[in-house]
Image (cartoon, rainbow, N blue to C red):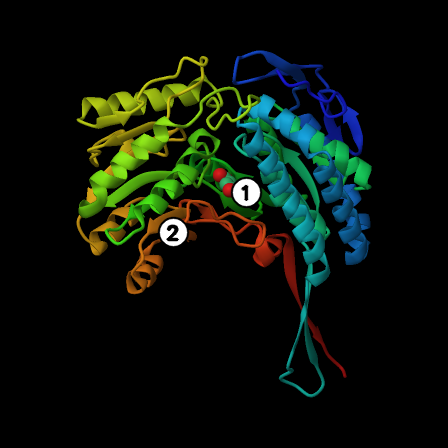
């Protein structure tokens, strides 16, 4: 096992600039999904500590908001630089607690840092407006002001980048934040706090409340009127609960929820490129991203060629512990994740799916599943309607473009969609017809700090990253200046 840098292996919460234990003294275990070994025992906090963190964030807010944009920008820039300087150590920690291959973990750390760099710059561009007046004696001005204290709840599949994607725009706008990292992966979050402190982010501006009990912490956030914004990435089911709770105080929400991404391959596609795109999208993080290709639809004329080539390339993927050189597929995050994939596969097999490769758990360890390609998938199978969150490519056929768009849109979700085609008219028609917040054309990878990430329908509300991301953390104030 890779040695973890003790400087970053923190096991206490971070509240008001101090490293603190849970009031009860309780701790929960964080284990390595590759072999089940314990990495750390982390402070198990609850509603009480969440309120302390909100107190701290509330007190820090006026001072942080009053700093100049340039000052906040410099502090964030320093945080970005420190993360980049320590990327290897942070990646080792991320792989240990999350399981993804080291190269992907390092990629995530750098991707996460890119949001800090980006929003450090955007801090200086939160422009207001002057609106031409309707009366000679008055002027209209629009101010953009920080929304206040932000509660952020982040997922285990990107334990570093989903924190920075929320906290960087919040801090850039002048907000302060209380973050609940995922139970399976709190260590990357705590390591980010080490460097936030070193960068000079003041006490109370960025607080972390690790816990194994998400519900009371979430409720402490949504019920507190000092929290003006909840930003959540995770399942649609939990997003609905948080949105309902947030409605009590009309707290604003940003929700980045389930995906169920369609991946369409048309007759005119470059099939080899489509196969490479499918590998990149489907098997990133062992299939555990909200934007992983989830439902493959392949046109009749190229179905067999695509299926065969995808299966051949899938067989070549190297499965193993994320800290081993060259590994491309790590373990799933926990036993529940493996059980879910096993159930989906059993149901698909029983209903007539044809397995081209894989289909079983892998003997690397208790949480590994062999990368799989199945065909003959039909709409009655659970796998056709469920976000798989595992390394299984499930292929269905289609006959024409209208059918493909209808199939792709036949879901309550609408985060990302992928398609491969070369006819320019088709590219426009399909791109416009897909009901998703993101469309990737002729590529399997698209995320970046400069573009807006977010979904439509039950995939969420709001956008993260890009010039739009900061809007989630500001309020618009209309000032009417009379008596001129
Ligand atoms: C996600 O799966 O929620 C994030 C994926 C990404 O940002 O690339």
Residue lying at 64% horizontally and 26% vertically, measured from the top left? 92
217 or 36, which is in the foreground?
36
Residue lying at 32% horizontally and 63% vertically, measured from the top left? 424
Q: In the image, which is nearer the foreground, mark 1 or mark 2?
A: 2
Where residue 214 appears, as percent x and y from the top left, is 56, 27
Residue lying at 59% horizontally and 22% vertically, measured from the top left? 97
Question: Label 2: which residue?
Answer: 442
Quadrant location of residue 223?
top right
Q: Is residue 374 left or right of residue 6?
A: left
Where residue 67 appears, as percent x and y from the top left, is 81, 54
Label 2 beta carbon within 8 A of ligand 1? no
Residue lying at 67% horizontally and 19% vertically, measured from the top left? 42
In 3D space, how far apart are the residues under numbered discs 1 and 2 (Cα atoms)? 39 Å
Of marks 1 and 2, which one's residue comes earlier in the chain?
A: 1
Relative to 468, residue 373 above or below: above
Q: Which mark is residue 446?
A: none
Q: Residues within 10 Å of mark 2 (few under 14, many from 20)?
A: many
Q: Is residue 284 left or right of residue 360?
A: right
Question: Label 1: which residue?
Answer: 246
Where residue 60 appears, as percent x and y from the top left, is 79, 43
Q: Secondary structure at mark 1?
A: helix
Quadrant location of residue 82?
top right
226 or 110, which is in the foreground?
110
Q: Secondary structure at mark 2?
A: loop
């Amino acid at each position: 096992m890779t040695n973890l840098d003790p400087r970053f292996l923190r096991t206490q919460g971070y509240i008001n600039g101090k490293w603190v234990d849970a009031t009860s003294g309780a701790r929960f275990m964080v284990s390595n999904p590759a072999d089940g070994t314990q990495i750390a025992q982390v402070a198990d906090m609850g509603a009480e500590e969440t309120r302390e963190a909100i107190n701290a964030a509330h007190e820090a807010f006026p001072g942080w908001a009053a700093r100049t944009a340039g000052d906040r920008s410099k502090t964030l820039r320093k945080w970005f630089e420190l993360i980049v300087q320590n990327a290897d150590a942070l990646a080792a920690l991320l792989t240990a607690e999350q399981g993804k291959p080291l190269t992907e973990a390092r990629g995530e750390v750098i991707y996460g840092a890119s949001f800090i760099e980006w929003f450090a710059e955007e801090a200086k561009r939160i422009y207001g407006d002057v609106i031409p007046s309707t009366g000679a004696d008055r002027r209209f001005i629009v101010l953009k002001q920080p929304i206040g204290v932000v509660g952020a709840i982040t997922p285990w599949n990107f334990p570093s980048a989903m924190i920075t994607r929320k906290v960087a725009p919040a801090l850039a706008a002048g907000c302060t934040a209380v973050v609940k990292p995922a139970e399976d992966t709190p260590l990357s979050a705590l390591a980010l706090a080490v460097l936030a402190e070193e960068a000079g982010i003041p006490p109370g501006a960025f607080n972390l409340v690790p816990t194994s009990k998400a519900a009371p912490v979430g409720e402490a956030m949504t019920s507190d009127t000092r929290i003006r914004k909840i930003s959540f990435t995770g399942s649609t089911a939990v997003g609905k609960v948080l949105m309902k709770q947030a409605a009590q105080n009309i707290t604003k929400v940003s929700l980045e929820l389930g995906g169920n991404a369609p991946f369409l391959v048309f007759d005119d596609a470059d099939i080899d490129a489509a196969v490479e795109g499918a590998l990149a999208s489907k098997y990133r993080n062992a299939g555990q991203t909200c934007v992983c290709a989830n439902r493959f639809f392949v046109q009749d004329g190229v179905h067999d060629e695509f299926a065969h080539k995808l299966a051949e390339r899938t067989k070549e993927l190297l499965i193993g512990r994320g800290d081993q050189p060259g590994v491309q597929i790590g373990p799933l995050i926990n036993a529940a994740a493996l059980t879910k994939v096993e159930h989906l596969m059993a149901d698909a097999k029983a209903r007539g799916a044809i397995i081209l490769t894989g289909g079983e758990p892998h003997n690397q360890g208790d949480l590994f599943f062999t990368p799989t390609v199945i065909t003959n998938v039909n709409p009655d199978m659970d796998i056709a309607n469920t976000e798989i969150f595992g390394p299984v490519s499930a292929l269905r056929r289609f006959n024409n473009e209208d059918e493909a768009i209808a199939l792709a849109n036949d879901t309550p979700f609408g985060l990302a969609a992928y398609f491969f085609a070369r006819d320019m008219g088709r590219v426009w028609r399909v791109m416009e017809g897909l009901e998703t917040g993101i469309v990737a054309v002729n590529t399997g990878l698209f995320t970046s700090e400069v573009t807006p990430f977010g979904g439509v329908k039950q995939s969420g509300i709001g956008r993260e990253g890009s010039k739009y991301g900061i809007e989630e953390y500001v309020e618009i104030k209309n000032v009417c200046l009379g008596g001129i």
